[in-house]
Image: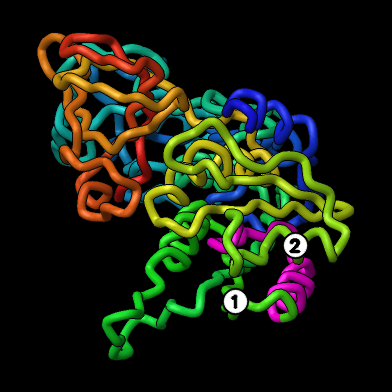
Amino acid sequence: MISIYEALSIIRSNIKRNITEIINITDSLGRIAAEDCHSNIDLPQLDNSAMDGWVFNIDALEKNTIDFEKKEIKAGDPKTETDSSKAYRIYTGGVVPNNLNTVAEKEIVELVENKLIINKKIEKKRNIRKKGEDIKKGDIVLKKGNYIDPYNLNLLISSGVNKIKVFKRPSIAIVSTGNELKEPGVKIKSHEVYDSNSYTVKALVKSMGIENIYLYRCKDTLEKTILTIKKALEYDIVLTIGGVSMGDYDFIRPALKELKCERLFWKLKLKPGRPFGFFKKNEKYIFTLPGNPVSSTVCFELFLRGTIEYIMGKDLCFKELRKGKALFDWKSKDDRIEFVRGILKDSDSGTILELAGKDQQSNMLFELSKANCLIKVESNSIKKGDLLEYIKLYRL
């Protein structure tokens, strides 16, 4: 058995970032930029009005009064020719003509016959957005490695970006093993269980924006396991669930050996999640998850989320460990690092950590449904008030 730190190091040194592809900017939400993105235009492209009001040349004012014309300048209208001795109605976003230099908002003016009277002292260039004051053509608007979230998408589209190079998302196959597993929705017998685990893992993968996911089901025979994994290896990453311990009907490791997959590690000093393993065949990565839903969730959040994000272009960053104050006592005779299901809360004194339930056995699902974090327990004895590390769980 190896430590979780050794496992992270081995994963780090063996995975490679995925290839890139060029896609339409409108399809890029959730992707990671594979190169710096530059603005194709000035933003704004021309001087324009920041307000609904009247535009004029401030040097033409006589005692805060100027003649006006009925001509209007609206957003989307091309730049127009105007008389520098006159004022014109302008709307937000309307292009300011070259010979005019000030916009008075409509709230501070009044119209008397053909005269515009300004009832407040104003300054030159008032309410004018200058060309390129936000972004200049050629400026970097998104750096390589950054997520394209709704706000970055807004900036990219506004900057005239049409196509963008992003890291390709990996395809992922999930291989679920176990004769006792049945599909959701069917009536089960007392010796059978619903296959919640594979759907949980699929949901965790899908929560990362990955769409190319295929779920294989495999009966507990060596021949079936070999054939199923062989098919699954057409995908970039294979996640097996169950069948990885040392029982008579655990065929994942023998099947991987038969398929000449290189074993990089198997079995961790971790509770829950000891049977987690990492294998490789050419540029395909195989991770063996335990069959228990709690164990597989712990392994996914500790190892797989960061690994998959790296392949998709993010800096290699495994789950961030934060610290909070324990509101519980804990005793254990196990020398493995343990991650227990917890509930984190904010308080006046900082983050506090509670257990999601007293029974932390890895088959207890109700505590997992209540948890919003996993609390790292390294000591055999924890006292209330101790400062502990934790990782946040993915929750909507």
Magenta residues (range)? 224-244
> Is any atom of residue 79 visible in this view?
no
State whether residue 47 is above or below residue 214: above
State whether residue 165 is above or below residue 310: below
Q: Nearer the viewer, residue 230 or 93?
A: 230
Could you give the CA–CA distance between mark 1 and mark 2, rounded to whole angstroms?
12 Å
The outermost residue toward the bottom is 187
Where does residue 306 sit, x and y in percent of width and height?
58, 38
Amino acid type, residue under disc 2 in the picture? Pro
Which quadrant of the view contains residue 242? bottom right
Q: Which residue is mark 2?
A: 254
Q: Which residue is mark 1?
A: 220
Where does residue 33 sit, x and y in percent of width and height?
67, 41
Q: Nearer the viewer, residue 221 or 147?
A: 221
* Label 1 neighbour load within 10 Å: few <14, some 14-19, many 20+: some
Amino acid type, residue under disc 1 in the picture? Asp
Where does residue 167 sit, x and y in percent of width and height?
72, 48
Where does residue 393 sit, x and y in percent of width and height?
36, 40
SS label for mark 1: loop
Residue at the image point whose x is 29% and y is 87% from the top: 189
Which quadrant of the view contains residue 158? top right
Where does the N terminus fall, quadrant-wise?
A: top right
